[in-house]
Image: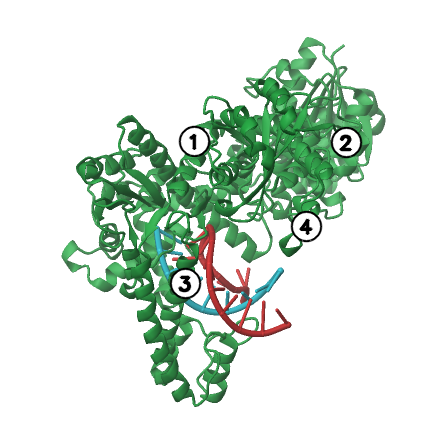
Chain colours: A green, B cyan, C red
Amino acid sequence: MDKLILIDGNNIIYRAFFAMPPLTNASGQQTNAVYGFTTMLLRLIEEHKPTHMMVAFDAGKETFRHADYQDYKGGRQKTPPELSGQFPLLKELLKGLGVSQFEIGGYEADDIIGTITRQADEAGRKVMVVSGDKDMLQLASENTTIAMVRKGVTEIEYYGPEQIKERYDLTPEQIIDLKGLMGDASDNIPGVPGVGEKTALKLLHEFGSVEEVVARSGELKGKMKEKIEEHAESAILSKKLATIFREVPLEQTLDDMVFNGLNEETAGPALAKLEFKSLIERLDLRTSGGGSETESEPEAQIDVTIVDEGKLAELAGVLEQVSILHVETHGDNPHHAEVIGMALATEDRQFYIPFDVLKSEAAEPIRMWLASSDIPKRGYDLHRIDLALHWQDIPFAGAAFDVHLAGYLLDPTEANQSLSGLAAKYGLSYLQADEDVFGKGAKYKVPDTDKLSEHMARKCLAAAQLIPLQEKELADNEMLPLFYDLEMPLSRILADMEKQGIAVNVEDLKELGREFEAQIERLVQEIYEIAGTEFNLNSPKQLGEILFVKLELPVIKKTKTGYSTDAEVLEKLAPYHDIVRLILQYRTLAKLQSTYVEGLLKEISGKTGKVHTYYRQTIAATGRLSSQYPNLQNIPIRLEEGRKLRKVFVPSEPGWSILAADYSQIELRVLAHISDDERLKEAFLHDMDIHTKTAMDVFGVGVDEVDANMRRSAKAVNFGIVYGISDYGLSQNLNITRKEAAAFIDQYFEVFQGVRRYMDEIVKEAKQNGYVKTLLERRRYLPEINASNFNLRSFAERTAMNTPIQGTAADIIKLAMVHMDAALQERKLKSRMLLQVHDELVFEVPEDELEIMKELVPEVMSHALALSVPLKSEVSYGTNWYEAK
DNA sequence: CTCTTCACG
DNA sequence: ACGTACGTGAAGAGC
């Protein structure tokens, strides 16, 4: 016999929220309502063993009831933000548990449930409805039992028609009449004022229905007669509002509510994600998915074969079955990382190969295997492995699934993207953190072979267990193309670019350093003289002492620890004292010298004479890359003094050129596309100067009337729009009052209404889903979007506005890189892609390919992704990066 | 190890 | 009333 349980999702989570103490997980997200809901759900499952189950949610602000009565649910307290943020969590969890959920735009949960119980009645199927809302009693029937949740969510009372008769001496249908007369403050249903449960029951026992009470009001007397007659209409309307609509156009059927018990694969991980450890234990759930053999003994001994030269042949024999690899490296910079050893895992065996064995002549078959691009490799951080092996002259190819990359795509804001962190997040059997095995910093020490090989083998096992879980989650999020067609191919391309490196003219760089040194020396002396004392100019503390105590300059801004001396403050102080200008100049030069001249010199490889940056693909929350050792994404350009540094970046072969191409206004073009704003699109379709055009529209003037100042303001507003505008931020940037800034923004939105609509919609979407997405389905979760703390919430709202823009721009240039790599191979060009700087790609190009590349690069970049506005890429080239402007 | 500052998109 | 513009990495000071 089928047993169907229908749950009023909104009602139960609401009750749970107020009943449970505020419980938060490690990331500060409140989870108490989800927890309360889940405990109740599990109890229902245990007690009733349902074959079908469904949780219904309200959907859409306006329901059909508002058509009858605008104030329906008016005056109701807004859902507390700490609760609304838990809806997405609950929905995710239900998915993981294998419990179906319905929501239908314009209808409330009651209506969905009412419709299903009607269908069940017609078919003679048993149903149980779970809610804390007394209205639900109207659904009770021979087949339908109402499980009334009481005292938070701890007690349940079961009502059939008999129990309702006992309790109220009414039929289920009369529950509606009861509410028609009583009203309901929480839904703002008026009823008849002054009539409570007692009176309403008395009237119904006598007359049977609201209609009868109204029709025969003559039989009443005194005050009661007056009240009924005066509020007859209200009573009729109230009854109508209280009536659950039982004809929702449902596409789902009973089959969509099948419940086969908790989904064994995903329930554990879903609960683990919310950190509901006690529930996992109580259910004795595996949290690892995968085979059940490993379940009960997480610390089971594993037997790793330690491969010496004698055992290499044995290993070569099973290479075909290897599914996972792990290469242990030491050092932050993978270009200089030490390789400790490699672990390989088949379905049922693990091998450890010390590095010297891997390097031995006898290991040639293993190295062939590593180098084959046709053999798929899976593991954690294959990009790093590729680089580390490369500098040991061991080629690596065939990266097919990178657990590190998958983890990043599934939650790019998670700070701990380590393998042990991911294993813990999915509740896999415990994997020790690398720090605990090796120690960190100066205390790093490789443990003995037994311990090392076991740890590395466990990493392989963890990766093996994570892969199906991650792949499933990527599939659920529609992120498989992003993962397999973009990020995975890109990681190989980045590794190629990094190995290639970019050549630096050391002599020129040193000469530049000498010039800076001379100027710095001169400035320092002059500053000491004016100050009348020598001090550490690099110390904001000591500098503050001189400026604000000794010279008594006005304090503009303070930091947590003392006086602020940043450039913004110094600019304001410049009129007061000559020393300030000199300090500003010193700062500029000192930065160039220490970070760029000295910093860059340190990073030049002794092997290649080039700098080999390391692009990190799993850092930026928006999907951008980041660059380290050295950072080649922040080489000076804005000021001429610094820009000169770009002259030292040169082609690595004589006669070649540096060619650079950058996207023009990519973020605003992306905004035009996703906001579908007619004016913004129009501007780009005609390839207008976007800041001038913005000024024309915002100030309502012709193109000739836009002066430099107007354009500057418009430009600032455009930046603000991309960042998620606030009047405060704009006022700071333009040095105007907040009021003026607010007026600017208003005027902007008046003109660019599509942009306003986008900003409103994306924030709403974020509040509803708990995340935002880019065009290529890259996600970013925003747990603070519903916070009650204004600052946290505002920050999340701006992030919701900015991330789809910045992130889609990142998607696009990544696509361009993949296409560009393919184009170079296809045409057998010798040109090489060297750098990516967010909206710019830098190549080195032989003389005879210049003409082709000048066409090809902008062509590929501008067609990386088709938007509703054209993408524009501008190309230039020269003998060094400075000339390519 | 954290704070401040400043370089880039 | 609240008080930040979005995203990064590196250097130096000082605890």
Q: Are marks 3 and 4 on the same chain?
A: yes
Label 2, on which residue?
A: A298
Question: In the image, what residue type sits under mark 3?
Answer: Glu
Q: Which of the 4 image quarters holds residue A242?
A: top right
Q: Are marks 1 and 4 on the same chain?
A: yes
* Residue A687 pos. (x, y %): 20, 43
Q: Residue furthest right?
A: A166
Relative to residue A45, is residue A818 depicted above or below?
A: below
- Among numbered discs 3 and 4, the one appearing first in the sequence: 4
* Residue A475 pos. (x, y %): 53, 26
Q: Are marks 1 and 2 on the same chain?
A: yes
Question: In the image, what residue type sits under mark 2?
Answer: Pro
Q: How many marks?
A: 4
Question: Chain for mark 1?
Answer: A
Q: Residue furthest bottom?
A: A532
- Among numbered discs 3 and 2, the one appearing first in the sequence: 2
Label 4, on which residue?
A: A439
- Among numbered discs 1 and 4, the one appearing first in the sequence: 4
- Closest to the observer: A254 or A818? A818
Label 3, on which residue?
A: A598
